[in-house]
Image (cartoon, rainbow, N blue to C red):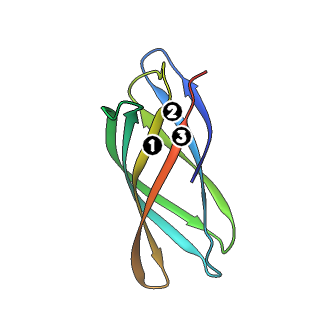
Amino acid sequence: MRVLGVHDEAVASHVFVQVKNPANRPMRLTRLEYTFASAKGSTVDEGDLALEREIPAGSTVVVEVPLSAQPSEPLELQGKITAELDEYVRTFTVAAQIQPH
């Protein structure tokens, strides 16, 4: 997972992350459980995002993750992404660094 950008709005922000399918078969993303934490380790925001995204083998997709605050300091996005690969459900740990504008 790689952060592509942050879009700030008056009340909230959206973090755009790139998710890559390293498998040689299509993968379907179904869920992202996430936490945004400050450098000091305190939780800034957290959530559970239902996904319905198909990623072809070796390809990437962009996932928009809501953030209820506008980041004024570096944050870390940590979480678990759930995907279906063939008929198996797999969960992967993800992490990415976010730098404010």
User: Residue 73: x, y in percent?
Assistant: 48, 22
In depth, the one of 35 and 84 nearer the eye is: 35
The residue labelled by disc 1 is 77
Going 58% across and 31% down the picture, which residue do you hit? 6
Residue where numbered disc 3 is placed: 97
Looking at marks 3 and 1 on the same chain, the residue that comes earlier in the sequence is marked by 1
Helix, strand or loop at mark 2: strand
Q: Residue 26 at x, y = what percent?
A: 60, 76
Amino acid residing under circle 3: Gln
Sequence-wise first label, 2 or 1: 2
Residue beneath label 2, please? 14
Mark 3 closeness class: few <14, some 14–19, many ≥20 residues within 10 Å: some
Q: Residues within 10 Å of mark 1 (few under 14, many from 20)?
A: many
Asked if marks 3 and 1 touch (Cβ < 8 Å), the reply is yes
Answer few, some or many: residues within 10 Å of disc 2's Cα (few below 14, many 20 plus, some between 14 and 19): some
Q: Secondary structure at mark 3?
A: strand
> Distance between the Cα atoms at labels 2 and 3?
14 Å
Q: CA distance from mark 3 to mark 1?
A: 6 Å
